[in-house]
Image (cartoon, rainbow, N blue to C red):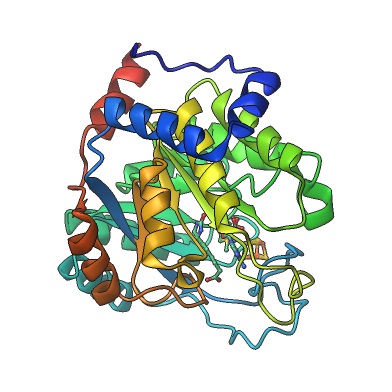
Amino acid sequence: MQNIIRNNWSLEEIHSIYNTPLLQLIHTASNIHHHYNDTAEVQVCTLLSIKTGGCTEDCAYCPQAARYNTGVDVQALMKKDEVLLYAQKAKDAGSTRFCMGAAWREVRDNKDFDRVLDMVKGVNQMGMEVCCTLGMLTEQQAQKLADAGLYAYNHNLDTSSTHYEQIITTRTYEERLNTLDNVRKVGVSVCCGGIIGLGETHEDRIKMLHTLATMPTHPESVPINALVAVKGTPLENNSKTDVWDMVRMIATARIIMPATMVRLSAGRTEMSVAEQALCFMAGANSIFAGDKLLTTPNPSFEEDNEMFNLLGLKPRKAFKEEKQYLRELIEN
Ligand code: SAM
Ligand code: DTB
Ligand code: SF4
């Protein structure tokens, strides 16, 4: 197997990989995973919602959009010290990446942003990889976050450019791609993936993977979320995501973006350990840990510890390789 990372995938190629008979697909993905990564290692990330609910946007899946009645309590931006306590708790439980999420359309240059910059500095000083997901960013804002020590920025495509308008109308796909460009320009690691179970077709999933795998540089991490169908959102009655679809998606992402961290993200509470094991076999090497995602439940640290022991997995160390790789990219 050659060490080649490709950015020139055609839709047809990805279509044919995605549609490979399932066991063969898992086998191929597993081989590629072995070649490029330490398959025993899984990155453990913890999420914290630092500003919850009351969001102006209309993302059809989201419990935090003000326009849906989902029972999520609106909470103003948390205080820095409180956030750092959560980060310490996550670190003590074995997390190496701490991701702070805000229910914002975009970052604004105000006191709240200054407070987030302080949080980023604080978490960085604790020796954790610090990540944020705050909505759209300008290049200047991305630079400020980078200067404060931000390691990664999460901004998802969510779905294909075609299905997108069925899901979100208050900001465009183009705007998402612009934010991702701004993050890339300042040398912050890009975390970008999507959700399955939004009513999209297999072709939409293939198209989204194609957009990710043909970026000039692959995102360093790609979260694959299964929709958490929250009561009160327009997608509350969507059917449960088929675990085989999750496996197929992860395996395809692994094959076309071999060195990327592929994150088995939202939806794990609905999956057995055996089903999650299949996802790790298919190339997933990152999870969100801790009993809450942003507003919805997630398996506890204890449950995940047990799973790691059973499957022989170990948490990946912080700051491994990625930074060097990014540095080289910027220098060249
Ligand atoms: N407000 C910011 C934004 O939209 O970019 C950051 C937070 S937002 C909650 C981050 C991501 O979480 C979304 O882009 C979406 O991919 C994911 N997400 C939100 N609600 C979800 C749900 N119910 N099920 C699965 N993923 C979800
Ligand atoms: C991502 O891809 N998934 C996370 C994180 N990035 C921000 C969010 C999942 C949210 C699930 C719904 C909730 O808990 O509110
Ligand atoms: Fe707001 Fe982000 Fe939820 Fe969309 S996904 S409604 S932007 S919090």
Please state the horizontal and vertical placement of residue 97, each as a whole percent of the image: 29, 55
Quadrant of the displayed image that contains ligand 1: bottom right
- Closest to the observer: 223 or 39? 39
- Closest to the observer: 191 or 153? 191
Quarter placement of the C terminus? top left
Q: Is residue 273 visible?
A: yes
Q: Is residue 168 visible?
A: no
Residue at x 72% of width, y 77% of height: 66
Q: Is residue 321 left or right of residue 272?
A: left
Quarter placement of the N terminus? top left
Residue at x 54% of width, y 39% of height: 22
Q: Is residue 286 left or right of residue 57?
A: left
Please state the horizontal and vertical placement of residue 144, each as a whole percent of the image: 41, 45
Q: Is residue 23 above or below residue 268?
A: above
- Closest to the observer: 176 or 33? 33
- Closest to the observer: 318 or 263? 263
Please state the horizontal and vertical placement of residue 262, each as a whole percent of the image: 42, 43
Q: Is residue 250 left or right of residue 87?
A: right
